[in-house]
Amino acid sequence: MVKILAITNQKGGVGKTTTSINLAASLAALKKRVLLIDLDPQGNATMGSGIDKLSLSATIYHVLLGSRPLQEVLVRAETGKYDLLPSNRDLAGAEIELVDLPQRDTRLKDVLRDVSEEYEYILLDCPPALNLLTLNGLCAAGGVMIPVQCEYYALEGLSDLLNTIRKVRSGLNPLLEMDGVLRTMYDPRNTLAQQVSDQLQQHFGEKLYQTIIPRNVRLAEAPSYGAPALHYDRTSKGAQAYLALARELLKSQGNLRKPKREKVI
């Protein structure tokens, strides 16, 4: 059965798109059939997957508005070995145009029914805002992954996101669950990062992923080459951390045993 995972945080700069791209590539490397959906008008997940967003004749914008079927818009991210539903600035207009359309909150959920059996994982890279695009992601997903940077304002805004998740679950998508909180850009030499990590552990407990994503130069460099870190530098700590996260997801679904302790890679 397909696992649809919304990767979201209304706070920008927390590694949301980096996580979407590298988790998709890592799951694909573990022989899983993966679809990555770029729900952000900035199109960073599209460019980071090696697809030129400016050259696209159709994007998820056209799919959400019903002018093009999803199958015609899908592209192959060759470096990451996953399928991609791309995005560009056209998607910014969808916010306004979706308002007057029927089932505006569940249009993504409706179109994914046609391809859900073709994939084992569908990852949704949501924009850094609690808007109609993010709401479509939450309505379509079964789980939510929240990347959180280990910094002073880490918990800021999380309560609003958690409230939104609860509201969506009570009204539009009763199957929605918080899959977990992911610590990103972690530097073990930084005392503040350690303190924030401890706070997240106390606050979220078992809902905190055991794998921790380190601050890593290769992760930052890879998008400019249009490739996931796994294919830019497989031996880097960042690439290995996302492979560990992918394995943790598989373990959480019962395919493998859970790791016994935190992995700081």
Image (cartoon, grey):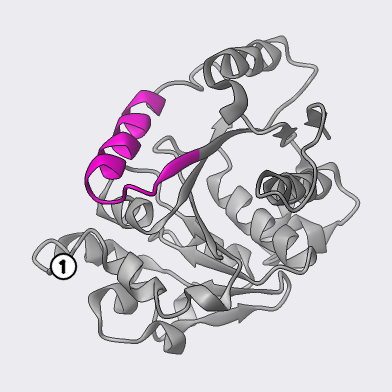
Q: Residue 132 vs residue 50: left or right?
A: left
Where does label 1 land, which residue?
97
Q: Position of residue 229 (x, y in %)?
A: 76, 56
Q: Position of residue 261 (x, y in %)?
A: 81, 26
Q: Secondary structure at mark 1?
A: helix
Residue at the (54%, 61%) spot, across then down: 45
Front residue of this view, candidates 255 and 183: 255
- Quadrant showing the C terminus: top right
Q: Amino acid at mark 1?
A: Glu
Q: Residue 29 vs residue 223: left or right?
A: right
Identity of the residue furthest to the bottom in this view: 72
Front residue of this view, candidates 157 and 198: 198
Q: Residue 217 vs residue 52: left or right?
A: right
Could you tell me if residue 56 is visible in this image?
Answer: no
User: From which residue to which does the magenta span run?
Assistant: 158-178
Front residue of this view, candidates 135 and 139: 139
How many marks overall? 1
Q: Is residue 243 above or below residue 108?
A: above
Could you tell me if residue 81 is visible in this image?
Answer: yes
- Quadrant showing the N terminus: bottom right
Q: Position of residue 187 (x, y in %)?
A: 75, 24
Dominant SS type (magenta): helix
Residue at the (81%, 30%) spot, across then down: 264
